[in-house]
Image: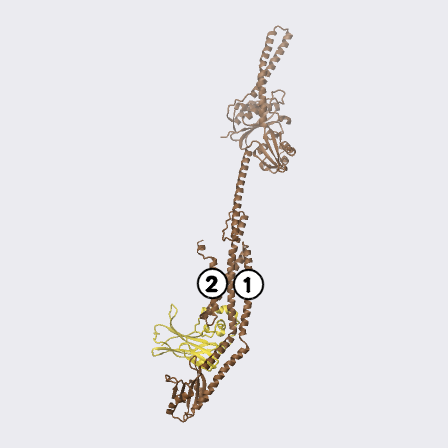
Amino acid sequence: MRASASSKSSLCYSLLYCLFAWLLPVLSYADAFGVEVKNAEMTLQGNSYVVSADIDYQLSARAMEALQNGVPLYWDTHIKVQQHRDYFWDKTLINTGIRYRIQYHALLNMYRVRNEGSGELYNFSTLSSALDLMSTIHNFHLMDKPVDTSKERYAVGIKVTLDRDALPLPLRPVAYTNPQWYLSSDWTLWPLTK
Amino acid sequence: MAFDKIKPPISLSILVLFGLILLLLQLMSSATQESSELSAMYSWLLLVNALGSVVLLGLVGVNIYSLARQLKKREAGSRLTTRMVSLFVVLALAPAAIVFYFSMQFLHQGIDSWFNVEIDRAMEDALELSQASLDQRMRWHLRQTQQLTSKLVESSETQATLEMENLRELSGASEMTLFSRQGRIIASSSINPGDILPSLPDEHTWLQLRQNSEYVALTPVRDDELMIRVIVTVKAKEPQYLQALYPVPVRIADLADSVEFAFVRYQEMHFLRHSLKLSFSLALSLVLLMSLLAAIWVAFISIRNIVAPVKALVKGTQAVASGHYDQELPVMAQDDLGFLVESFNEMTHRIARASDETRMAGIEVENQRAYLETILANLTAGVISFDAEHKIRTANQAAYRIFHIHVNQFVGRTLLELVENYAELAEPLKSIQRLLEQADDIWQQRIAFLGPNGRQELLCRGTPLFSQEGFRVGAVVVFDDVTDLIQAQKNAAWGEVARRLAHEIKNPLTPIQLSAERLQHKLADKLAAGDADMLQRSTTTIVQQVEAMKEMVDDFSEYAKPSKKQTVDIDLPHLVQGVLALYALRSGVKFKADYDTGLLMIKGDPVSIRQVLHNLIKNALEAINTKGLIEISLRRVQKNNTDFIEIALYDDGPGIKDEQIEQIFEPYVTTKAKGTGLGLAIVKKIIEEHGGAIWVDTSRKVGAGFIIQLPACNF
């Protein structure tokens, strides 16, 4: 059910990286960090397609340090459905997602996760439990109208990104140039079948 | 030109560019404020500014490269541009670098000064104080709730339901719930009657509750509200849990929030300290870089504009130096340089005008010179000018014609040098040289010499030339070939003599002769035989001498009388052949005739020409006496672009003595015992009447030779 991942990096990020790479020392890649979409599937429940996925968040030391020091991190889980076209770019039918904000509260010594879409708040005394909440996408409602997979080819994709533009301003140039802040996952795409 | 018209002025472009750069830098500066709406665009602004810097760097680089190439080619104005740009860069860079250095120092020290150990500790203490305060409150609420459980230990579920409201109000909780171990709600009471469903503990709370049998924690209810959740075990028959939610007083919550906010903010700042320095340094560097690069670029453009008239002036000057006076430089501005350019234009106009005038004057002088040269060339008199060293500077055609010396051997040499190559001219050349050296004033001298064409007589007039300072700078010698003139004068004189002789001498001769004959006739019979014989001899002698005298006078008359020529075309070989036929029978004399092929015709009187030949042959025959050779040749020659027929007549007789050569053609000059001395004089006269010339060929060493040249008849 898995398809190979394709990566797209935006022009802005690449150019900034090129420009400032020489300003900063090359940092070690020794630590394994980053976000990975582990299991993702789309199922038909009645007339609706729902997506479920497990996402593995492995924060880098730098990101962890920032979080511990009260810097809120914004995570976007992008979910899209694409219709394949032979002679043109694939048509994006659905492009939706979930946005979480995770922040450490020193007074209560707990991690607070907030779903930016619904406004729901969750408090956790440990980081792992906070990340666990964000890790699980359970029956995320994608679309109602079933598509005819026998005629057209469709693909579903999930990608998790760290919104670096939401980081505090002084951190942004660093975030664009330091690999410790390259936490976003690649697109995980798989064909949609009945 | 059209492009120039639609192109905006440079100053406007520069203003727009600077405006754009300032806007970008201002935007970036605004974006660095966390609260600014531009904050989201910070990365893009940073990128755009960086790209702008790269573009400016490229522009400056292109300008530097172009300047370097101009320098290498040593183009006009390139060195001035380099000097001005270098000066500007040094002047702009030095203060900018100083300001940059101190700004960075202040920035780093400023940021570092925000943080120190005391503040760190104070912040942590403040947080701890808040936590302790809240902790105390929690413990108090725990105790309070535990006390409440005693009232529920013995009560049934119904009683508990009834009691719950009282207990809640008593404790001051906002919500109170009793639930079983399985989570079933037994009784609940809320300050807000609208809340039907009480807030139940989550899994994590359950876990803690089961472990510790009680639970107390601060729970954020909404974003800005804190609750103290207390859950204690009610030790009844079936263990139950009593949960109470106590609101934290607004004041305390606010204070705690404030402390937490400050702490988090401080911690965040502390964490971001290096990033902050980096990002400010980056912004500052970008601002400086962009401003400097833009300034340098604008400096390049401005300096190029300033140097442009100088460049044009240098090019114009070079053009003028190489002789192009039609330089008109554009006046770009009404400043000092504009004034300079205008002055340059006026100067070139004046130079061009002066140059035109000079050229015109030169042409005029040249025309005058050519005119004079034409006149001089067409003069029959020879004119030679000398420099101070008596070297020939100029000589006209007539001079060459008179001396028969080729042009290229004439100029730049002294007369004495010419003597070496032209020995036959030694006499006149030396005489002229001597006069040149000696004379301080105008001199005139008649110089006679024997040239290749026979005896020549020159009338020379010399004028020394002096400079304005009185130094001698040369001389001009004018000379006429007066040979013909003098000859004509002599001829005229002899003609007059002949006429007088005819008139004065011949007239008395006839009476003398008649008287002598009459004496003979009358006295012959009357005298004795001896006397008669003497009379006979005397009268005969008188008559003979009178006859001879008459002949002589006739010859003179013949010589003196004007020619009565009948001009016809004469075929010379035919005529010569006819004359020679008359002498062919003379024994002992050989005739050798040699004619050129082709036509050898002249125009003239055949009787006169025949007489010329007779006279010459007769002379030759007399010279060689009885035995010898007479050669006659006829050939066509060219002299002064005119065709002549040359008749050369040679004999192998004793020849002519050098001292006689000069006078041989003059009347009454003879080497013979008998003869009137008019033969050659008549020959010369006839030849000259036919436009020809006769001279003695002095180059011949054996016998005598005469050369006659007569104009050829061209058909």
Question: Label 2's element?
Answer: helix
The answer to whether any part of residue B404 appears in the image is no
**In the image, which lettered chain appears yellow?**
A
Residue drawn at the location 61% of the way across and 13% of the way down: B542
* Displayed quadrant of residue A6: bottom left
Residue B440 locus on image (x, y percent): 64, 33
Residue B394's place in the image compared with A7, above or below, is above
Answer with the quarter of the image where residue A146 lies. bottom left
Left or right of residue B106, residue B469 in this image: right
* Residue B189 image position (x, y, % from top left): 39, 87
- Nearer the camera: disc 1 or disc 2: 2
* Image coords of residue B179 (percent x, y): 40, 89
- Choose top left, top right, bottom left or bottom right for residue A36: bottom left
Please state which amino acid type lies under the numbered disc 2: Gly
- Picture coordinates of residue A101, whole percent (x, y): 44, 77
Q: Identify the residue position indicated by label 2 in the image.
A: B19
Q: Chain of mark 1?
A: B
The answer to which of marks 1 and 2 sits earlier in the sequence is 2
Q: Identify the amino acid type marked 1.
A: Leu
Of all chains, the one bearing label 2 is: B
Q: Nearer the viewer, residue B240 or B252?
A: B252
What is the C-alpha distance between the residues marked 1 and 2?
Answer: 21 Å
In the rendered picture, chain B carries what hue?
A: brown
At numbered mark 1, what does the secondary structure look like: helix, strand or loop?
Answer: helix
Q: Nearer the viewer, residue B153 or A81?
A: B153
Instruction: Name the residue that disc number 1 marks.
Output: B93
Q: Nearer the viewer, residue B145 or B417?
A: B145
